[in-house]
Image: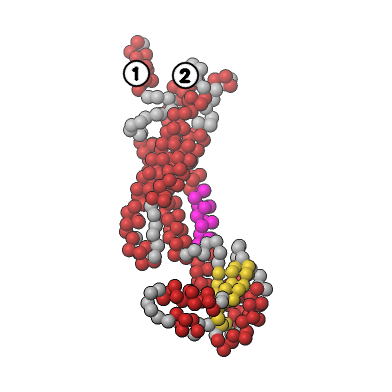
Amino acid sequence: MKTWRKDREVQANMRLPGGWQLPPFGIHQVLALVIVAVALWSVGLVWLALQGGQQWVGSWQQEVKVHVYVDKENRSMVGGLQKRLSKLEGVQAVRVVEQQEALLWMQKWLGGSGLDAKGFTQHLPDSIEVTLATPRHELVLQHIKEVAEKQGGSVNDDELSLAQAWDVLATIQNLAWFATLIMAMAMALIVSNTLRMILLARAEEVHLMRLMGAKEWFVRLPFILEGLLLGAGAALLAWLLQWPMLWFTSSWQLSLGIDLSGWAMLLPLLLSGALVGGLGALIATAHIVSPDNET
């Protein structure tokens, strides 16, 4: 009987309540860390891809503009075309680009080549700048192109492609937010189940602490700290796993004119991982019963 009591005392003193085992982690914590790290790595890659897509599209995120060109022989139709474009649904503003503005743009584009920018500008078609409203009407780009062609003008197809690409990116971004929330819930449940198993294994110790007067927050604190640390550790591992992907795609990024920053993902991943781990810990310890409420 005496030996049994000593074994019980040794077993109780070897571990802190709540499964606080640092270092090292137990097998359950390691598995949860790896699973959460892989999930965070996948989410991080999605947001990095969106970052690259936005850089490729350019600075069209806040205000989208489309240019309509009218040849010199159709200059008399510029005024009517401007009025028809301004009446389209989804168009915010329409203005004719002045000759002086086109000259300044041409000088900037030619740089210090020594070419006659004024001579080039005289051969440029008249340009109408169309600013689109936000949020953009679904068919406004098609309507602008139809009106321009009927009035003898043409639309910059590259700008239309960029605008359509931004629409696709906006849709993907909304889907990415939805997928991120679903993944966050799944990761929180993984952490919760891991800590819940540890809590059940320490049920007698936790119950003993409650009988001795320990407050609920005191019993829950080791679990919450472990959840935060587990989530942050998984986020750090996910961030490290992103660097090989960035290195392997560096030449591809250079060819597209984009520059993905892995450092920009460090803080968001750490905060997301800690939040997920803390939420999982709160869920796991939500049903710690107070001895005063037991029957």
Check disc 2 and report the residue beneath it.
Answer: 208
Residue at figure coordinates x 44%, y 32% from the top left: 225
Mark number displayed over residue 10: 1
Within the magenta stretch, is there residue 253?
no
Q: Amino acid at mark 1?
A: Val
Q: Dot 1, crowdedness within 10 Å: few (<14), some or many (≥20)?
A: few
Q: Main secondary structure of the magenta part?
A: helix
243 left or right of 217 in image: left
Q: Amino acid at mark 2?
A: Leu
150 left or right of 107 in image: right
Image quarter (top left, top right, bottom left or bottom right) of the N terminus:
top left
Location of residue 129 in the rendering, given as x and y in whole percent from the top left corner: 57, 73
Instruction: Using the rendered view, name the quadrant where residue 47 is placed.
Output: bottom left
Describe the colour scheme in one phrase.
Answer: secondary structure
Instruction: Using the rendered view, name the quadrant where residue 287 is placed.
Output: top right
Looking at the picture, does residue 221 appear above or below residue 77?
above
Residue at figure coordinates x 48%, y 40% from the top left: 275
